[in-house]
């Protein structure tokens, strides 16, 4: 009765001790397809204990403001009913207020422009929701221009001096978060805007530039 059991064990040992050269090749690691956090560590959303539950009710950092703007941009049902095109002026609608910030929705018809302005003591984050806007910004080094399209965030700091215009042939919609809330917006005639930008650069502690 003992001999058959011994022979069976020997057969098993032989099977599992085969030299590496006869083993099937290992499949290529998954990350050779392209590195990313998800491909290496797996989808973090699959682990509920990793989901953040301690985020503040209101953002307090630049990253938090940027996240709020992205959330609003993705929530079309929230902002679309507030879109309104007015032939006489850009249309403003306040989307949200919180401690130390406020969020505005702006509707732009083709050709409508903000004119050169600063934002007083406010800084902020904006993005385009529909259409395309053109930003002309002024610094002591001169003028810069950039196209703003959906999906791109634009961050601006205190003293930023710029003009935004819908230079396209289609209406546009944008969302702007200001912190603190926008209580001061100084306008500059085109001829004096560059001079004001140079004055601001010479005295960076000054919020108002005239
Ligand atoms: Fe602005």
Image (cartoon, grey):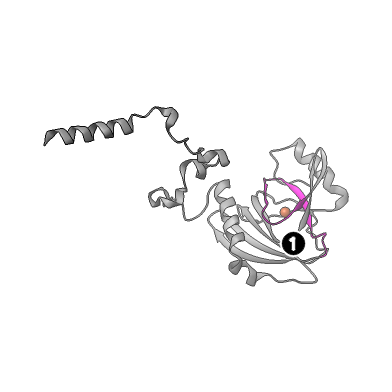
Q: Which residue is mark 1?
A: 131
Residue 42, relative to residue 5: is it above or below?
below
Kindly tell me whether mark 1's CB lies below 8 Å from ligand 1: no
Local crowd size for mark 1, using a 10 Å CA cut-off: few (<14), some (14–19), many (≥20) = some
Residue 31, relative to residue 18: is it above or below?
below
Q: Quadrant of ligand 1?
A: bottom right
Residue at figure coordinates x 60%, y 61% from the top left: 74
Residue 28, relative to residue 125: is it above or below?
above
Please state the extent of the stretch shown in magenta in the rendering.
147-169
**Quadrant assignment for the N terminus:** top left
**Place of residue 127 in the rendered image (x, y in percent of width and height, measured from the top left):** 67, 55
Question: Is 1 on the left-hand or right-hand side of 155?
Answer: left
Residue 161 forms part of the magenta stretch: yes
**Place of residue 137 in the rendered image (x, y in percent of width and height, measured from the top left):** 78, 47
In what element is the residue under mark 1? loop
**Place of residue 167 in the rendered image (x, y in percent of width and height, measured from the top left):** 83, 59
Residue 27, relative to residue 210: is it above or below?
above
Q: Quadrant of residue 81?
A: bottom right
Q: Quadrant of residue 98?
A: bottom right
Residue at figure coordinates x 56%, y 61% from the top left: 97
Residue at figure coordinates x 58%, y 64% from the top left: 75
Question: Is 191 on the left-hand or right-hand side of 172?
Answer: right
Question: Is 110 on the left-hand or right-hand side of 159?
Answer: right
Residue 201 forms part of the magenta stretch: no
């Amino acid at each position: 009765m003992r001999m058959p059991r011994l022979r069976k064990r020997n057969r098993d040992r032989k099977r599992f001790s085969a030299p590496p050269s006869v083993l099937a090749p290992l499949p290529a690691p998954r990350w050779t397809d392209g590195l990313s956090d998800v491909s290496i560590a797996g989808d973090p959303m699959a682990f509920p204990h990793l989901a953040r539950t301690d985020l503040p009710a209101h953002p307090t950092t630049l990253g938090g403001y940027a996240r709020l703007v992205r959330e609003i941009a993705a929530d079309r049902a929230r902002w679309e009913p507030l879109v309104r095109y007015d032939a006489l002026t850009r249309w403003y609608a306040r989307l949200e207020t919180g401690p130390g910030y406020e969020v505005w929705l702006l509707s732009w018809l083709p050709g409508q422009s903000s004119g050169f302005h600063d934002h007083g003591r406010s800084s902020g984050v904006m993005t385009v929701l529909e259409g395309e806007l053109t930003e002309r910004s002024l610094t002591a080094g001169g003028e810069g221009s950039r196209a703003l399209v959906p999906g791109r965030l634009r961050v601006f700091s205190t003293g930023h001096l710029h003009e935004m215009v819908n230079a396209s042939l289609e209406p546009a919609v944008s969302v702007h978060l200001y912190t603190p809330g926008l209580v001061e917006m100084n306008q500059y005639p085109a001829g004096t805007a560059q001079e004001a930008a140079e004055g601001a650069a010479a005295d960076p502690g000054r919020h108002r530039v005239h």
